[in-house]
Amino acid sequence: MDIVVLTGAGMSSESGLKTFRDTDGLWEGFNVDDVASAEGWERDKKMVLDFYNNLRSQLEVVEPNEGHYGLAALEKYFNVEIITQNVDNLHERAGSKKVLHLHGELTKVRSTIDDSLIYDIGYGKISLGDKCGKGSQLRPHIVFFGEPVPNLQKAIEITSKADIFLVIGSSLNVYPAAGLISYAPEEAELFLIDPKNVSIPSGRHVNVISMLASEGVKEFTKIIMNK
């Protein structure tokens, strides 16, 4: 059985990471348009670099939660593929083997003139003047607002093969990721884990588990193991 999981900020919030976008439009006290847009990068590169350096420092000290570990444990019984909107590495640290990052990865940086030049820096810092092999400034390996999502087509291909499509902790408001649910096959079962009311952009039945990620994954596991 192929289980495809789309995870959003609510997946990692129990680990202590702030959600990417909350109702006040702030992320770690910063306006998201200043630190997560191409325009913000052009306006103040140092601020953006410092912001992601700080996030990397936070990521180094937090741990995967029970939800992350629960998804990894499902790989013993099913083919589980995770598509995440999150830029952290908590799925990988919990043991998940198939993780596709839609919005980039916090522990990587890339060239500003050649998107294929990507460097894994772990939890290190980058500063103005740090350059790629071709001599251009390094930038966070993050998909900023207004930039294309390189892994979107791959995500669509994965979703189109799902027997079960599970959404965890995503508001389903950030496109194009929110549109993935429409690519799940008609016969696929749809599940949503989130304690908040989420508007589902689909005319199909969705099994809602109104819990946080950790408890929700446990409940989801019970349901599918009893099928």
Image (cartoon, rainbow, N blue to C red):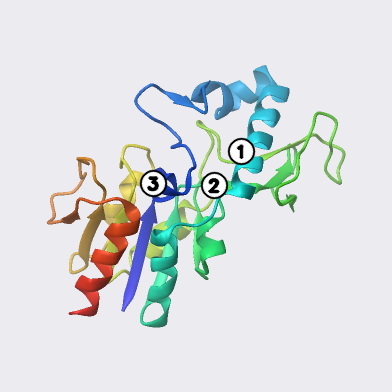
Secondary structure found at label 3: helix
The residue type indicated by label 1 comes to Leu
Secondary structure found at label 2: loop
Q: Quadrant of residue 201?
A: top left
Q: Residue at x 24, y 78 (%)?
A: 225
Q: Quadrant of residue 141?
A: top right
Specify the quadrant that holds the N terminus.
bottom left
Specify the quadrant that holds the C terminus.
bottom left
Residue under circle 2?
87
Work out whether mark 2 precedes mark 3 in sequence or the reverse, and give the earlier one: 2
Quote the CA–CA distance across marks 2 and 3: 14 Å
The residue type indicated by label 3 comes to Ala
Q: Is residue 201 left or right of residue 154?
A: left
Q: Are marks 2 and 3 in contact (CB under 8 Å)?
A: no
Q: Is residue 109 left or right of residue 80?
A: right
Determine crowd level at label 3: few under 14, some 14-19, many 20+ residues with C-alpha closer than 10 A. Answer: many
* Residue 140 location (% of width, % of height): 67, 39
Q: Are marks 2 and 1 in contact (CB under 8 Å)?
A: yes
Q: Toward the viewer: 36 or 107?
A: 107
Mark in the foreground, 3 or 1? 1
Q: Is residue 155 left or right of residue 219?
A: right
* Up-down relation of residue 153 to residue 79 (above or below): above
* Residue 48 location (% of width, % of height): 65, 27
Picture disc at residue 55: 1
Determine crowd level at label 1: few under 14, some 14-19, many 20+ residues with C-alpha closer than 10 A. Answer: some
* Residue 59 location (% of width, % of height): 60, 46
* Residue 222 location (% of width, % of height): 23, 72
Q: Residue at x 40, y 50 (%)?
A: 11
Residue under circle 3?
177
Q: Toward the viewer: 145 or 113?
A: 145
* Up-down relation of residue 98 to residue 121 (above or below): below
